[in-house]
Amino acid sequence: MVRFQRVGLRYGNGPEIFRDLTFSLPPGSFHFLVGPSGAGKSSLLKLLYLAIRPSSGTFSLLGRDVASLDREEVAMMRRRMGVVFQDFRLLDHLSALDNVALPLRVAGAKEEQVRSHVAELLAWVGLADHIHSLPATLSGGQQQRVAIARAVITRPNLLLADEPTGNVDDMIGVRLMYLFDELNKLGTTVVIATHNEGLVQRFRHPQLRIENRGVRLVPPAARATA
Amino acid sequence: MLFRRSDLPLDRDPAGGFLPWIVGLMVYLAALALAGAVLADGLVERWRSDLADAVTVQIMPGADEQGAQTQADRVEEAVRFLAVVPGVASAKPLPQEDVLRLLEPWLGSGSIAEDLPLPALIAIELIPGAQVDLADLKHRLAEAVPGAVLEDHKPWLGDLARLARGIEILAIVTMALVAFASVLTIVFVSRSALAQHQEVIQVLSLIGARDSYIAAQLQAYSFRLATLGAALGVALALATVLAGSALLGRAETGLLPLAQSFSWRWLLLLLPVPAAGLIALATTRATVLRQLRRMA
């Protein structure tokens, strides 16, 4: 699903962010992406959603070498991914429904299917009463759930989420984790960047730990250790 | 190609708000030039069909030394002469009242005109398509009948046709300039829309929108604005032409018979509407696709 081979990353002539990054994520896996702030969690996610390209090494995604993709192929690949951005990136002038519908419409889905699917999902994340609300009228937590709904509406092969439970209370956070688990059981590969040790402890998925400009795979948190 | 719903909040663009007005103004000017060309063309055609086969002979008023032969005698003589010339369908003297009426705008209807020595006119109609050497005929007629001058309208029509062609070229150049200025304006508006909505466009691209999807949205937007502007400009130009012809019609100048000269050519005036729309569409598409590739 995801394979990094000796990938290096730096922005322009800036400091090296990753060096010799080598790891792979098998299809259907579920990983937490952890590490201290500023270590490069967001950069790794950006690599994964093709917003930036490696400075060196090989990165292949969904069976394709990323370096060989043209713009059209990048678009097609992104349709197989869902991304929850830390700052949500909702479109302010569109209702919750239209925001969540966007990936389907962009991919040319039929309008009648779009509406029912989206309404159903929004109800599932507890926003049934806010379908027609603009993002600005929603709380941070509600906006986050809209962003998550938008990321999962297409049942992506790969789901990337940057602090998806950062703005919601624990109960909703757990509910969202169940949603991710549910998708994972349907075959979606999931990577969730988080600071929330509680979630990591509770859901016991393997971790990608960023340290020393590299990534270390850590087995699921044992009950006793951190 | 045209979206009912837009993912971009384009209607709030300040630059886009001006587009219809700019396009409208330019199209107005272009449509006026076009109207001028159509009008000139129509007039030339009308005059040509009226006059091409017509030749006039003037019999100058008799001076004393020409003796007993009166002007009327010489008119008769000229008509007899002309009647047997091959290619001439008919030669009819114009009644003197008609000649007076023609001169009325200049001389008034008083008795002055009757006292003036006026030329008598003979209208000749040629058989359509007949090859008549008018220069030779003019020469022979002048020898046969003293004081007879044959007037050919063709040189005058030629000048008129050249003038009409000049107006046509002017109209075409105006249209080209307007099209070029429109392209520049639309490139500017498209770029400013792209810059203004960069974040939204980035999100669209991150969730899998193709470049062509993004271009389609902006395309539809500038198509709408440019078409609206062009329609405005054409409507204004038509109003101007109609108002102008009404004014001229009241002045009773028979020279500008706008109402009668309606032809399919007037449909040309509508051309700027689809043209502006298509130019806007193509320009925006090209601009957006190029900018997106550059942004990557």
Image (cartoon, helix red, strand yellow):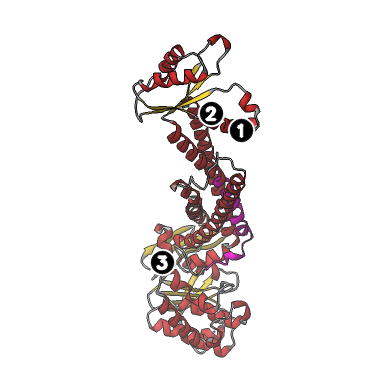
| Whole-percent x, y for residue B177 in the image | 55, 42
Could you tell me which quadrant the N terminus of chain B lies in? Answer: bottom left
| Whole-percent x, y for residue A130 in the image | 56, 84
**Residue closer to the observer: A106 or B280:** B280
Calculate the distance from the C-alpha at mark 3 to the C-alpha at mark 1. 86 Å
Residue of label 2: B96
**Residue closer to the observer: B198 or B78:** B78
Magenta stretch: helix, strand or loop mostly: helix
| Residue occupying image coordinates x 41% and y 17% | B137
| Residue segment shown in magenta | B7-31
Q: Which amino acid, mark 3?
A: Met
Calculate the distance from the C-alpha at mark 2 to the C-alpha at mark 3. 92 Å
**Residue closer to the observer: B178 or B140:** B140
> Would residue A64 be found to the left or right of residue B46 on screen?
left
> Marks 2 and 1: in contact by CB < 8 Å?
no
| Whole-percent x, y for residue A64 in the image | 37, 63
Q: Is residue A216 magenta?
A: no
| Residue occupying image coordinates x 34% and y 26% | B130
| Residue occupying image coordinates x 52% and y 19% | B71
Residue of label 3: A77
Residue of label 1: B104
Mark closer to the observer (3, 1) = 1
